[in-house]
Image: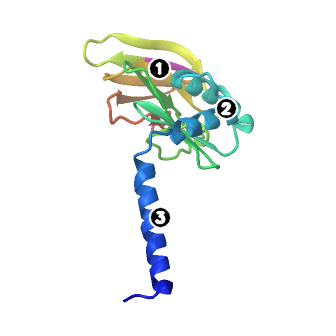
Amino acid sequence: MRSRATLLPLLAGVLVTLLLVLSGCSTATPTADGRQDLVTAHGLQGLDAREVIDRLEATPVSQRPAGLIASVQPAAVMLSDAEGREARLPLPEDTFYLSVAPYLDQTHECHFHSLTTCRGELGNEDLTVRVVSETDGTVLVDQTLRTQDNGFAGLWLPADLTATLTVEHEGRTASTPITTGADAPTCLTTLQLR
């Protein structure tokens, strides 16, 4: 027979386990509350995913929210902060965001664009950008864009696209195939202008 001293820790462990199991079945929504706290704390309340991307991308680097990580993935923007809060803001099903940072001398590897930490070489520069569908030759983008302070230019494209992206800057050009599928990168940092 076990003594009272050895039974108490055992009962406490069983009680903690039971509470964890029951809380997992709870109908409370701490994630929703955490999401609201997160977006409010960083001044993003009332914005959808597209608006969050556009706002954070356009914010000068020195004014970006400290402690906020905003990762653009093909179907959503994933937000987290230093307080441990997380939020997922879904993108419209028919759109895809591709952030492009052409470079001359230096770049970094990137797959999912971070709106708060990624930096490109050519901040606040004019680029001529052209996107042509490989399926039917439709020109989807043909315009001059200015890179943001972080060196990236954002493109809102149709989802499930296969195309060619060409960027020109001060007489130098780079071109690459792109896709906007479910596993496609949202960050393009491999365009070296020559």
Task: Measuring from the top left, give residue 112's x and y in whole percent.
Answer: 46, 39
Contact between labelled residues 3 and 2, with CB atoms less than 8 Å apart = no
Kind of residue at badge 2: Thr
> What whole-number distance in Å separates the C-alpha atoms at marks 1 and 2?
25 Å
Kind of residue at badge 3: Val
Quick check: 177 left or right of 102? left
Magenta: main secondary structure equals strand
Are there few (<14), some (14-19), or many (20+) residues within 10 Å of tag 2? few
Q: Nearer the viewer, residue 189 or 97?
A: 97
Q: Nearer the viewer, residue 115 or 51?
A: 51
Mark sitting earlier along the chain (1/2): 2
Q: Is residue 29 above or below residue 126?
A: below
The circle drawn on residue 156 is 1
Are there few (<14), some (14-19), or many (20+) residues within 10 Å of tag 1? few
> What whole-number distance in Å separates the C-alpha atoms at marks 1 and 3?
48 Å
> What whole-number distance in Å separates the C-alpha atoms at marks 2 and 3?
33 Å
Q: Could you tell me which residue is drawn at 33 percent across and 36 percent down?
A: 183
Mark sitting earlier along the chain (2/3): 3
Residue at the farthest right position: 62
Task: Measuring from the top left, give residue 80's x and y in whole percent.
Answer: 57, 43
Mark sitting earlier along the chain (1/3): 3
Can residue 170 be seen?
no
Q: Nearer the viewer, mark 1 or mark 3?
A: 3
Range covered by the magenta-colored residues: 123-130
Q: Is residue 86 above or below residue 158?
A: below
Q: Nearer the viewer, mark 1 or mark 2?
A: 2
The circle drawn on residue 54 is none
